[in-house]
Amino acid sequence: MSTAETTPATRDDLLRALTDALSPGAVVTDPDIVEGYRRDRTMDPGAGTPLAVVRARDEDDVRAVMRFATAHHVPVVPRGAGSSVVGGSTAVEGAVTLSLEAMDGIAVDAAAMTVTAGPGAVTGAVRAAAAAEGLAYPPDPTSADFCSVGGNVATNAGGPSGTASGSTARHVVALRVVLADGTVLVLGGPSRKASAGVPLLDLFIGSEGTLGVVTEVTLRLLPAPAPQHTVAAFFTDVDDAAAAAADIAHRLLPSDLVILDRTALEVAEQAVPMGLEESTQAVLYATSEESGAALMARICGDHGAADVFTTDDARQAEAVSRPRSAMYEALEGRYAMIVEDVVVPLPAVGAYLGTVRRVAADAGQQVLTYAYAAEGVVHPVIPFDPTDGASAGRAAGVAATLRAEAAALGGAVAGEYGVGADKRDAVADLVGPAVAEVQRRVKAALDPDGLLNPRVLVGD
């Protein structure tokens, strides 16, 4: 993979060629501004300094960047909102960081039940635009208020609503993609069902900007759901919460089913005091229509919940569910975080939550854990001090152990957030050499010079 080593003279030549190829003001070299694009939410201390940041305004700018990159053999790192927690958009030394944040248009076609959006459109804004037309875009990543649709496509993002509605891939009906040489592919279309040979549309979903740059996304919308009821069940034993979640998953498809452990709740309490009972070890949050919510509340009671709260009031539901976002608010600006993203078989969720507690205790490391229990997705969050080598090393060691423990249970080490730079070695070990080689062949066919996001997914 190329990292474009340049001398000052050739750097000036490259910048001149890049600037000439793009619309006025698109190329940014101011060091203070460029600094803000070096890292995503991973806060990787090894992030490179790009040759320049390009703030693309339209597909023509994207094509111009890729033609420049191919002509001069300069890597390109596509970037949306910079919300990756696995190093998916960390800058590469001497590369072009291609920001798509300004390509944020949103157009709902209510008759066709679709929404077409630029890759920089914020997911929450897409959901709101659909709701304004009496329709729904179900995918709801935890970062929906700031993550972008292009990033969601790049990672096939999920979220708590994935149990019932699936991840991003289920809702993508069409893409416009710019390849490494500047060629534009138009994939899919408005038809709900169609077959046109090899499913290239699916190939680009989850490819993390390594095969092409998405410049437009068309998403399927659904009818607005029935009024939702939220259940919050408080457990004195996290194993009971996991058992209740498993029972719920076997009996209905909730819109949302999440478990927060005691450590996550304690951290959330720092941002949003909620009078957490000393005996509470886990809280299960679930959402469904009225009859489903009643069943979920009953199941939680049957599994020993100390208290169960149910509401159909949206404001009450938001208030009771606040710890899910508050735990991040309490950590932001104080610590760096490794946000793990593993998937285990459904029957193993309770066992894995216990494993996280054991590994954290043995290492003397704080680990906050939440789980999308109906899908087997578990997110251990490991805060650390990036200026302290011992703290960073301990956190990395715990993360590696937790990945290995997930794999030992028959799970995977990347579920919703993508592979990025952080997990590519772990994923290569898990999928095996044959699968890794096929991935490399696909990459080589579409990006023969290895210019697109060269640090992520399966490497050499």
Image: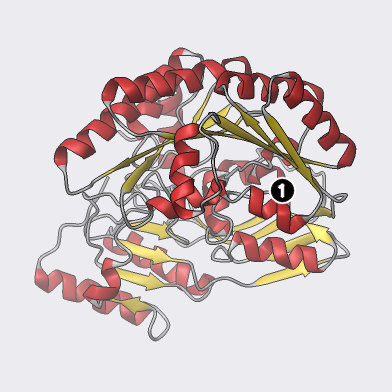
- Please provide percent x and percent y for residue 221: 79, 55
216, above or below 406, in the image? below
| Residue occupying the point 33% across, 70% down | 53
Left or right: residue 356 compared with residue 52: right
Q: What residue type is labelled 1?
A: His
Left or right: residue 347 compared with residue 188: left
**Few, some or many residues within 10 Å of mark 1 (<14, 14–19, 20+):** some
| Residue occupying the point 35% across, 25% down | 360
List the single residue furthest toward the bottom.
Answer: 24
Q: Which of 326 and 345 is in front in this view?
A: 326
Q: Name the residue under label 1.
A: 171
- Please provide percent x and percent y for residue 35: 26, 67
129, above or below 207, in the image? below
Which scheme is used to colour this image of the protein?
A: secondary structure
Left or right: residue 46 compared with residue 377: left
Residue 439 shows up from this direction: yes
Q: Can you say which quadrant of the picture contains the N terminus?
A: top left
| Residue occupying the point 81% across, 67% down | 109
Secondary structure beneath label 1 = helix
Q: Nearer the viewer, residue 369 or 133?
A: 369
Residue 189 shows up from this direction: no
Q: Can you say which quadrant of the picture contains the C terminus?
A: top left
